[in-house]
Amino acid sequence: MDNLESLLKQLSTQVFQGGGFDRPLVTKRRSRMCVAVRASHRSLLPNSIILDTSSSGSTYFMEPKEAVELNNMEVKLSSSERVEEQAILSLLTSEIAESNMKIKHLLDKILEIDLAFARASHAQWMGGACPALSSRNCNISQSEHLSINVEGIQHPLLLESSLRNLPTDVSPRSPDLDQGNGVMNFETKSHAHFPVPIDIKISHGTKVVVISGPNTGGKTASMKTLGLASMMLKAGMYLPAQNQPRLPWFDLILADIGDQQSLEQSLSTFSGHISRLREILEVASRESLVLIDEIGSGTDPSEGLALSESVLQYLKDRVNLAVVTTHYADLTRLKEKDNRFETAATEFSLETLRPTYRILWGSMGESNALNIAKSMGFDERIIERAVLWVNKLTPDKQQEQKGLLYRSLIEERDRLESQAMEAASLHSDIMNIYNEINNETQDLDGREAALKAKETHEIQQDVRTVKNEIQTIVQRFESQLRNVSAAEVNTLVKKVEADIASIVEAHQPSKDFLVREIGQSLYTPQVGEQVYVKAFGNKLATVVEEPGDDDSILVQYGKIRVRVSRRSIRPVPPDASSSGAHLKTQVQRIRSLKDLGSVSEASKNQQDSYGPVLQTSKNTIDLRGLRVEDASHQLNIAIDSRAANSVLFIIHGMGTGVVKECALKLLRDHPRVVKFEQESPMNYGCTVAYIR
């Protein structure tokens, strides 16, 4: 390939010199290297083979007769190379097949890691809380008297559908949505309807929970939320709840939810429920969670109630926890006979005649069927007659149920009053702390002004001290310079530079002082003013334009102009610019003496003037996307075709760095390249070459 490229390069140059093409061009057509020549000048390459033509037909891509043998050899060797590659790949494939078990083991481990990251990503997405397992010990602390203690949990599937409608930068538990008590503020996000958070609190001794309440009140959704939370705990997932949820470990989660009616299996609604319930009772263990929706429904109310009570009495001795929903009022009274039963009710607002989707633990709810029917526009005469029938059928039970509900509300009121007292005490403590902090900040402005004045005075003293010390060193150096030989000048200059550097370092202000935001909110730089830019390592830059609407400022650092944020610039402290310029002048006076013996070399380096280094399409070559051989060939042609004392911009990109390394090696070895500059922080992927 080297011989072939060298030959074609020579022929292409001859074609270019003979006017056959506007530049030397060696390319590849039909897997063979060739030379581009105008159709009118094809006689410059006699006995050549035309491999291809341009779309306009004005350019021929011709294979010279001198290159035919080399091209044939290249094709032959490339074919042999592919055969060798296939052999190597076959060998590697056989080695991989031998490591089949190890690879599968690694894939299993990668799957475990991927699953862990998926759980973490899901937890972060929904703002989840890490759950904990409830203690099984009998001697439990007061804080762990609840077997299940989950505050403000939202139905995971309903929450996910709501989150998909949220902007990506908003968390479901952000302050504008969460009021701090597990209640979401839906009014602030009217476009996203979040599920209402509920509290699930079940004590250790409870075995059966009976949830009653109105239709569409959230009984089934609350029971499903408990089941999903238990499954997420078993899967090692975070829960969409407040604080730290606490649940027990259930070996099985068995549910009978929904209508199991099936025409194919000749199952009615009741038969479907009984079939599923029989399977649950057969496999349930003492560590299982059983969820039953509308137990005993779909048949005669008296028989359904009897069967339901018998099933619950059976479950209380054989499972860890059973949660059922029902409209049978008698099932809610099982708590009076056995403390292993617990009741709960979904709340219903009598003012709006709509459910609130919250659970009142320890309460017994009413179906409110008549109120719901009335709110939906039922005939009032039908509603009045139904009320009379209810009062006639169960007057005693109605009064008893109202009494139990009243006692439950009294207990709830007492608990809320206790929490209100605790909140008032906490508010009082916070106000005391606030008053103490407010008193401390009364004279803050005066103390800040005094501190600034003190620091300014100390800085001015340090500047005067540094000036005097450096002036003394410079005077001593100038007196010593008259008495030393030319060979000792460099030694004397290095000694003086070291002395000055030690003085500057001793009085150098800390980095925190340079970047301190003193009056940053009020500081507006002016055009032409020098400022410190944090992005440049706190270097001095000049303001070119005033701050724009986006609060950005255009500054110039050397030959570079860049737009930076206003927050990343700092004003130059008083006297810092003048003293810094004075120190720089003193150091330059000394360093200029080092160059006394190198005047001839400096003048020699200035012989070649390349003018302004300005990139255009004429002096730029783009090597991105080329193979190493093609890139090297194109760069050689570009360097040879450049005029004397010119610059060439080589765009090689970043990528794997192979093309870049090839380009830099060629530039180092090429006789026409005087020097080259690699990419800068403002110009990645490009190298500038200076052509002799």
Image: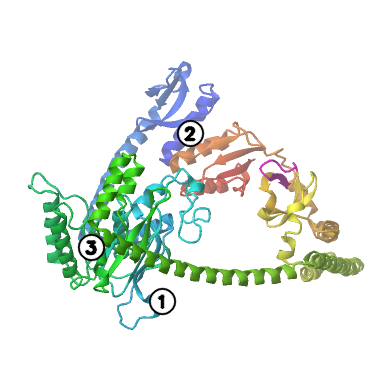
- Asked if one can make out residue 107 in the rendered structure from this viewpoint, the answer is no
Whether the residues at callouts 2 and 1 have beta carbons within 8 Å, the answer is no
The quarter holding residue 428 reads bottom right
Q: Main secondary structure of the magenta part?
A: loop
**Residue placed most toward the observer, 1 or 79:** 79
Q: Residues within 10 Å of mark 3 (few under 14, many from 20)?
A: few
Give the amino acid at mark 3. Answer: Asp
Label 2 to label 3: alpha-carbon separation: 101 Å
- Residue 508: horizontal and vertical position, in percent? 77, 67
Residue at label 3? 330
- Residue 375: horizontal and vertical position, in percent? 36, 43
Label 2 SS? helix
Q: Which residues are magenta?
A: 544-559
Whether the residues at callouts 3 and 1 have beta carbons within 8 Å, the answer is no
Nearer the camera: disc 3 or disc 1: 3
**Residue placed most toward the observer, 185 or 531:** 185
Label 1 SS? helix
Q: Which numbered disc flags the more N-terminal residue, 2 or 3?
A: 2
Label 3 to label 1: alpha-carbon separation: 33 Å
Residue sitting at x 38%, y 24%: 52
Disc ID at residue 143? 1
Give the amino acid at mark 2. Answer: Lys
Residue at label 2? 9
**Residue 652 falls left or right of residue 590:** left
State yes or no: residue 619 in magenta.
no
Nearer the camera: disc 2 or disc 3: 3
393 lies above or below 60: below
